[in-house]
Structure formats: structure tokens, C-alpha cells
Image (cartoon, grey):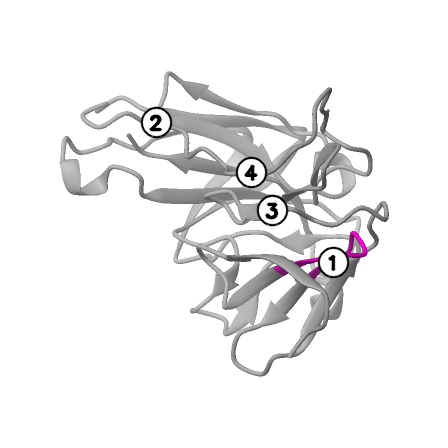
Amino acid sequence: TYAGVRSIAASPNLPEIALGFDNGQVARIDLATGTVLAVTPGAGLPVVAVDYTTLGTLVWADAGSVYSDLAAAPIYTATQAIADLSVGKAPTASATPFGTGCGGNASVQWLTSGAPTLGNSTFQIAFTAYPVAPLVLVALGTSRTASTLLGVGLPFDLAPVGAPGCDLLVDPETVLAFPTFSGVQLVIPIPNNPALAGQSFFAQGFVRQTSNPLGLEATPGLACVLR
């Protein structure tokens, strides 16, 4: 039992729920154990609604403002009292950067050729390695919240393996190597299969550098939603 619960939502891709309280706080709860994973300080007004985006970002509202766990300040302030909130799921294909890289690749920008629409046989993702590196790896996977391959949650801190300040952001189900590259351009044909609508895949680059014992610096991630 949790006293003062006003609203509740279930994550679409994590084994957790979010609870909004009368005191304005929002708590993430582990579904298996009931453990409180994190608590977001509130503004003092009751949380009238909570919801998750497709990628698992938590959004909530009190009577006056809408908040996101990606922003320190309210992302919207209402002129009238808010009574409810629902997150709309994007009806279009999208390719959205997320997370942060490290070292010289912390600010690397992902580029795409068009959108990952069903039937786009020439869809391409790309980024420029900076500085020029003797090896670039691209990890592709279907999760950004947990790695089945490695048995860890994501993002995963790479400090224990010699890359402090770097995080693994995607499940590396497939890893492609590009030797002696100043950048990567990767064609990922999207089949014209309606069953794939709404599915996602994720990418992250790793560039050979000598700034840490692991010898790799990471780029931000890229989340692609098929439509």
C-alpha cells in the first residue's frame, strides 16, 4: 500500500509502474518487488495524471503544469486547471537521438536519409566520427532499457570495463565494424510488412580512441520507430 496515491501508469517497456501522489511527488515502483526505484520531488500540488511515452519517458501533470523526467522545469504551464493527461503515440515514423556520448564523440550528430517508413529500402543512418578513428563499431538492437545479451539494465555504465563517463545505451544484438573510417553510413532497408508498424530499433556508435583504457568512446543513441 502507498498512502496518498492519486494516479498510476504502467511502463510500456520496463517492469515498473509510476505513482502520482497528493503531495506532488511521482514514484517509480518495481513491479516484481514493490521497491521504490526513484522519487521525483513535486511542486506540492496533487499529481492528477501520469503516463509513459513509447520509449519509456515518464510524463506527469498537476493542476497547473506538465512535467517530464527529461526536463528540470515544467514543459507546459496551463492557463486552466488540468484534470487529466494522456501521451499521444506518434502516428508517423521517426528517428530521434537520445542519451549522451562521451569523449570527443559526446556531441556527434546522427543523420538519416528520410524516415524509417515501411517499404523504405534505402533508409540510411549516418554519423561522422570525430576525430578520425582507425575503427568504428555500430551496435544495433531492439531495446534501450535492458540488454538480454549482457544481462544488464540500460543505460549501462562502462566505467568498470575501462571507459569512465561512457554508457552503453542499446542492447548490442548486432555489432558492425568499420575499419579506418572518419564516419559511418549504414543502409538499413525497411521491409513493407504491416506487422512491423510501431516496432523500434536502436543504434549507438563506438569509436576507437586512446582516451580511456577500453580504447573506445561512445556516441549518443538513435531511436528509430517504424510506421
The residue at the far top in this view is 114
Query: Residue 142: image x %, image y %?
Result: 39, 52
Q: For the magenta stretch, what is the residue range?
A: 19-27
* SS at badge 2: loop
Specify whether residue 26 is painted magenta.
yes
Query: Residue 104: image x %, image y %?
Result: 76, 35
> Mark 4 is on which residue type?
Leu
User: Which one is in front in this view, the residue at disc 1 or the one at disc 4?
Assistant: 4
Specify the quadrant of the image occupied by residue 153: bottom right
Whether tag 3 and tag 2 are in contact, CB under 8 A, the answer is no
> Mark 3 is on which residue type?
Ala
Residue on which the image places disc 1: 163
Given residues 167 and 63, the one toward you in this image is: 63
> Mark 2 is on which residue type?
Pro
In what quadrant of the picture does the C terminus appear?
Answer: top left
Specify whether residue 191 is painted magenta.
no
Q: Which mark is residue 49?
A: 3
